[in-house]
Amino acid sequence: MTSTSSSPVTETILNFIDGSYRKGSEGKSFPNVNPATGSQIGLVHEASQADVADAVAAAKAALTGPWGKMTTAERVKLIAAVATEIERRADDFLAAEVADTGKPRHVASHIDIPRGAANFRMFADVVSTMPGESFNTSTPDGGQALNYTVRKPKGVVAVVCPWNFPLLLMTWKVGPALACGNTVVVKPSEETPRTAALLGEVMNAVGMPKGVYNVVHGFGPGSAGEFLTSNPDVDAITFTGETGTGQAIMQKAAIGVRDISFELGGKNPAIVFADADLDKAVEGLSRSVFLNTGQVCLGTERVYVERPIFDAFVARMAAAAQGFKPGVTGDRAYLGPLISAEHREKVLGYYRRAVEDGATVVTGGGVPEISGAEAGGFFVEPTLWIDVAHGDTVMREEIFGPCCGIVPFDSEDEVIALANDTVYGLCASIWTENMSRGHRVAAAMDVGVCWVNSWFLRDLRTAFGGSGHSGIGREGGVHSLEFYTEITNICVKL
């Protein structure tokens, strides 16, 4: 088992297959590292190809076992019990999430863990009220026919998860998959294995049938990720993560014509008009740039500000950035680490590139001074640039760190063109007190989600996803049902 009640230094994190915790059959393991200290805090057992095959086989068998025979009401009741058990064990999940990600406790306790439970409860409610279609059809002989639809689970769903919000984004997929009657095999990020493994204890506690929920640990190519996505008994694949990885998974999914749902990278713009409420804009954008140390798929890395307020906005954002302190213990002003030493070097590489390309560093641009246990953590400074050209590398490529370039603009048409000039299309935010303009510009954004005078304000029933290199498909509310179910149309001649 994997339990956060034991010492995290000695914790062993196992695969969860067919209702039981297992070591990897080939004896391979890899270290689990706390990003806030850089120290090893556990050992993760890597799943072999045979282990992954066992997990997929268990998931397939469960489709025709007790799980597959449950009514929707019975299934929904069990899923709601999962939400309740996560809430009951919130402290365990919080400890696991903080240890894996290094993020401050106030972030994980207010976002990650509550949303993890809410995802199960919300999708249980959606499925309980799921409508069907029916049509009365005139037939050539003058009679009538009744056409109606029946939704059925898609089958075994591979859930490949990212490391930035491990529990939240995993349950965003597992919740609707199970609510629709599927079974799942989860491959969490190798950086953040704990909460996915811990959820196995919850599944057993509430009486979830064996094989419905499975977890395999490992990496991508040549490891659990590739073994899972290439397994022919996987019926659908849902993935959140980097665009290049999504392309590789898409190639695997093409064999057997398996369905996919992808939420990928982004280079999200914000547009601040001169009539914006600066207090609202700075508060909202300081969150969208720096929350979770910039490791948010919806985060803002490009900010376009109308010229009359450009200097004032830059000064206010710089003050906000300088108010964040590195570390994980403390109040809301504390900025956690990046996920790994490798990712920190990637972000610092962009910091260096910005200067090489002629950007002016308003604040940040390096590694903060920090003492104590956290001196070994993977921290970087929150960073703002001006004097960046729209075509510069740091304005084109996703960085996934606490930074943004700020660029002035002079007209609405100009800024719409700048915001949309990207291969990505995940989200955007518009800041203006002119609501006619807000509606107009938001509708012109080539993105899946656009906020006006807010950011990260989510109703879980609404469509979520991106266009272009930011993904394929939409999830959320009834939109998730389109991916996690197959529809059979039944035509009855009356």
Image: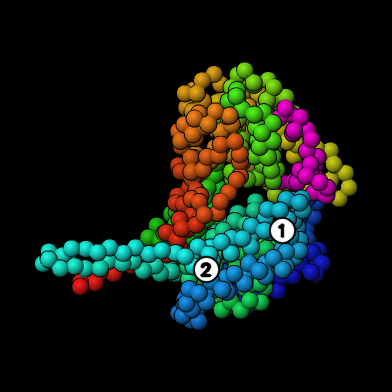
Which stretch did the figure color magenta? 316-338
Label 2 Cα neighbours within 10 Å, binned few <14 / some 14-19 / many ≥20: many
Categorize mark 1 by other alpha carbons within 10 Å: few (<14), some (14-19), many (20+): many
Q: Where residue 178 is drawn, which disc sits there?
A: 2
Q: Position of residue 420 (x, y in %)?
A: 48, 32
- Please report the residue visible at 83 percent of the width from the left and 47 percent of the height from the top: 330
Q: Is residue 262 visible?
A: no
Tag 2 secondary structure: helix
Note whether 180 is above or below 439 in the view shown: below
Q: Is residue 111 magenta?
A: no
Nearer to us: label 2 or label 1:
2
Q: Amino acid at mark 2?
A: Leu
Circle 1: element type: helix
- Which residue is located at x 69 percent, y 22 percent? 312
Q: Is residue 335 visible?
A: yes
Residue receiving disc 1: 97
Residue at 81%, 63% (x, y): give it: 9
Q: Which quarter of the figure has residue 162?
A: bottom right
x and y percentages locating residue 108 in the rendered image: 72, 54
Residue 333 in percent (x, y) is at 79, 41
Task: From the viewer's side, name the closer residue of 39 and 8.
Answer: 8
Specify the amino acid type for callout 1. Glu
